[in-house]
Image (cartoon, rainbow, N blue to C red):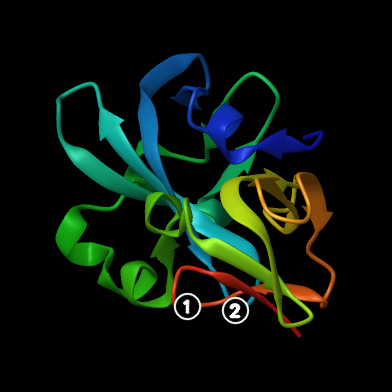
């Protein structure tokens, strides 16, 4: 996968082979690690399930699940939800670098491995893409703070 924004990831179908199982509605990430944990997916049967990133590969045209069985029922996804945060809860949070506000989190740029490479910001001292490189870290409060 080339670099994609989290918003672009949410537009990709989740497939096994050529069969579309559903579409992601939420990106779940581990803010401390700066890495995607998985996706909440609305399946074709209308049910919401969780797809761990380790059980899928993100390609430019879809998110390829290894099997339909890797989509977890909500009660089996608690482990991932405890470790992760919804991107929707982080969006709109203030980003601080070196003790000063640099903008509001709008989106993420994600590598093929699921690692968050950069934050996309609106407003503040910095507008645009800020690398997630140890100087700016996502924190569990929903904001990003400089290290």
> Residue at 48% across / 31% down in the picture?
10
Q: Position of residue 22 (x, y in %)?
A: 34, 25
- For the residue labelled by badge 1, is the local secondary structure a helix, a strand or a loop? loop
Q: Nearer the viewer, mark 1 or mark 2?
A: 1
> Residue at 69% across / 74% down in the picture?
137
Where does label 2 land, which residue? 32
Quarter the N terminus occupies: top right
Where does label 1 land, which residue? 140
How many numbered markers are drawn?
2
- Mark 1–mark 2 Cα distance, whole angstroms, equals 7 Å
Q: Position of residue 58 (x, y in %)?
A: 64, 37
Q: Mark 1 Cα within 10 Å, few/some/many (few <14, many 20+)?
A: some
Does residue 131 appear to the left or right of 123 in the view shown? right
74 vs 95, nearest the viewer: 95
Q: Position of residue 73 (x, y in %)?
A: 20, 52
Does residue 102 appear to the left or right of 15 in the view shown? right
Q: Earlier in the sequence, mark 1 or mark 2?
A: 2
Quarter the C terminus occupies: bottom right
> Residue at 40% across / 18% down in the picture?
20
Disc 1 vs disc 2: Cβ atoms closer than 8 Å? yes
- For the residue labelled by badge 2, is the local secondary structure a helix, a strand or a loop? loop
Figure quadrant of residue 100? bottom right
> Residue at 65% across / 46% down in the picture?
123
């Amino acid at each position: 996968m080339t670099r994609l924004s989290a918003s672009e990831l949410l537009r990709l179908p989740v497939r096994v082979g050529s069969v579309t199982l559903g579409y992601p509605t939420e990106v779940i990430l581990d803010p401390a690690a700066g890495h995607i944990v998985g996706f909440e997916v609305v399946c074709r049967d209308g049910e919401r399930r969780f797809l761990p990133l380790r059980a899928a590969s993100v390609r430019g045209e879809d998110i390829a699940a290894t099997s339909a069985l890797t989509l977890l029922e909500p009660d089996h996804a608690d482990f991932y939800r405890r470790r992760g945060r919804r991107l929707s809860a982080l969006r709109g949070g203030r980003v601080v670098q070196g003790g000063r506000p640099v903008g509001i989190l709008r989106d993420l740029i994600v590598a093929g491995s699921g690692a968050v490479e950069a934050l996309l910001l609106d407003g503040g001292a910095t507008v645009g893409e800020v690398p997630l490189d140890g100087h700016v870290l996502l924190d569990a409060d929903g904001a990003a703070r400089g290290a």
